[in-house]
Structures are given as structure tokens and as C-alpha cells.
Amino acid sequence: MSATFKALQVTQTPEQQFTQEVVNIGLDKLPPGDVLIRVHYSSLNYKDALSATGNRGVTRQFPHIPGIDAAGIVVNSNVPQFKPNDLVMVTGYDLGMNTWGGFAEYIRVPAEWVVPLPSDLTLQESMILGTAGLTAALSVNGLIQQEITPSLGEVLVTGSTGGVGSLAVSILAKLGYSVVAVTGKSKSHDFLKKLGAKLIINRSEIDEQTGKPLLKERWAGVIDTVGGNLLATAIKSTQYGGCVTACGLVAGANLTTTVYPFILRGVRLIGIDSVQCSMDKRLLIWSKLAAAWKPTYLDELVTTISLEQLPEKISEILQGNIQGRILVDLR
């Protein structure tokens, strides 16, 4: 095992700027933890891009290595449940936020963060899914727990070309739901149809500005990945007894609505968090993603890059120019 490893390091300059550079770092610099993992794959998420550009709400201390996802092989373990050569993955918790993350050839983490790789998933597939796949599946699971079945009508997915949205479209379609995908990118229509969207609408169609407390009922369920007024509009147009899940805020953190959808139509709003999700639920959801819920067109969802290509893709994801998932190959 080499005494150093490659990583994308983010450094703050004296001028309060943030630079991203692939560097060699000593293994002895890794944070303390129970399990040392040789990372084979990671993935790029919006939160990673925020961390890589100095967002203090995500990462407080620099220099830093982002990457909230990692999958690889155990090299060393201080706990009996993990042994050398075990295939494992880590998503969420503090990885890539204030603990050095997956944009590196090695990570060292607490055993409580480590998930054994399901037998029906490869390391590569696990990171095409990653945090985005876990979040999408938790959202789908939320609808199912609230008894939103395919027979009840259309399910709306906002931010449908992003990581969470595209995976949600694919999972829902595989489970037989009639999916309406929202996007502002006309060039992505063929991509969304391939994933299983029955209908594609422009985001302007669900960005209602009149301030009406209720709109015509349409959606049996909603998976919202963007927040802001699109979420407010979706809530106001959800059917009686319908369910809305919320997991993102790229369109805004504020939610302006009234209680009318909730007290007159019985609409349910469920928050989705994949960061501190319990291990029992993680294992359940990953078992579904490895089997019946595995997206049919995983290869269609992914662009594979190297560590050196990350800075360019970080800029693109912040501009909203990424379609599907970005897989980082660290082998």
C-alpha cells in the first residue's frame, strides 16, 4: 500500500478564493476512524460542488476533500463486522462535508457509516446510484408508505434531469407509475422518455405566480427535488389525499403556501433526508435498489470522469448543466 494517495483538495487562498487541485497526500493525514477503504468509485453531487467552492453551510474547515459518496474495498478494519477485501460503500453522514470524502483514493471513516455492498450491485452501480439514488428511493418509498399507488394517477417529478430526479423517474416508471417529468431543457426530452417518463412539461407550467391558495387537482403524488415556488405550486395542485415528498432547495429554501391543501384536501408533505437516515432504513432501501427497484437504464444515466476532470464538472453542476449522474473513477 502506497504511503500517499491522490485526492482533489480544495484550498482557501489568502484572498478568500477557493482552488481545486489534484494532489498527493500522506495516508497518515486521513482522519481517525474504524475502517480504511480503498475507494474505487465516487460520484458528483450538488452538495459536493458547494463544498468545493467554499460554501460554509456545507464545509467549515479547509483544506478539504469533498465527496459525499464512496465505494470500494476495505483495506484495514478495527471492528469485527468488516474485514479486509470486503466490498463496501459510504453515503451521507459527515463524509465529504467536514470529514474528508470520496474524491480521494482512500477514506477512513467510523464503522457506523459503512454499508456492505448488496450482492446484486457492483461497486460501479452503487455509485451511479449513490446519495442521489438513495434519496430518490427514499422519496418513492415515502409515496408507497402513504399508499400512493400507480392506479391513483400521475406522479410529478421536478428537477427530472438531475441526479435525484432522473433516478426517481426511472424507479417510478419501473414500478408502473405514470410519471410526468418537469424540465426546462428541451434537449433532454428523449433522455427522459428513455427513462420512462410518460409526459414531459416545462417548469413554467408548474411555476404558478397568482398566489391562489389552491389550484386544480392533478397529481396523485409528487417527488420534488428543487423546492421554492415549484414545490408550492405542486402542493396546491395535488389531488385529495395525495402526497408530496421534498428533498431539495436549488430553486429556493423558502416555501410560501397556505394550510388549505393540507386541511381541505388532506395533502401530506414529507421531508426526505438521506444524510442521517437510520442504518436499518438504509439497508432496506439499498436492498430494493439492488433488486426490484434497480433502474433499467443505469448506463444511460451516467457520465464517467477522472479526478482531474472534476473541476470542470463542478462548474457545470452549479450552472445546472448536468444531466443524470457523474461517476468518478478512482481505480
Image: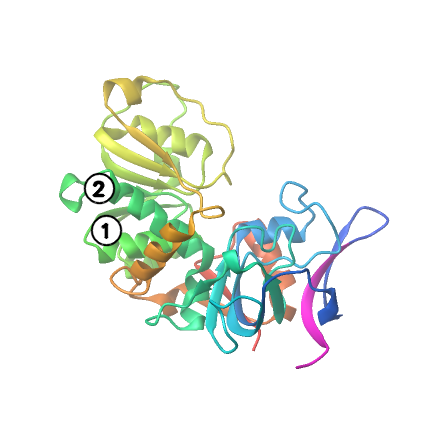
Q: Residues within 10 Å of mark 2 (few under 14, many from 20)?
A: many
Left or right of residue 262, residue 184 in this image: right
Identify the mark at residue 154; answer none if there is no mark: 2
Of residues 185 and 280, which is closer to you in this image?
280
Q: Position of residue 327 (x, y in %)?
A: 50, 66
Identify the mark at residue 111; answer none if there is no mark: none
Q: Name the residue rendered at 50%, 28% in the picture.
A: 254
Amino acid marked by disc 2: Glu
Identify the mark at residue 198; answer none if there is no mark: 1
Assess whether mark 2 and mark 1 are in contact (beta carbons under 8 angstroms).
yes
- Spot the residue most to the right: 14
Of residues 72 and 183, which is closer to you in this image?
72
Q: Quadrant of the C terminus?
A: bottom right
User: Which quarter of the picture shows residue 149?
Assistant: top left
Asked if 72 appears above or below 284 in the picture, the reply is below
Q: Position of residue 270 (x, y in %)?
A: 36, 35
Q: Residues within 10 Å of mark 1 (few under 14, many from 20)?
A: some
Q: Which residues are magenta?
A: 1-11
Task: Compute the Cα span from label 1 to label 2.
Answer: 9 Å
Q: Nearer the viewer, mark 1 or mark 2?
A: 2
Q: Is residue 22 shown to the viewer in this render? A: yes
- Magenta portion: prevailing SS class: strand
Q: Position of residue 243 (x, y in %)?
A: 28, 34
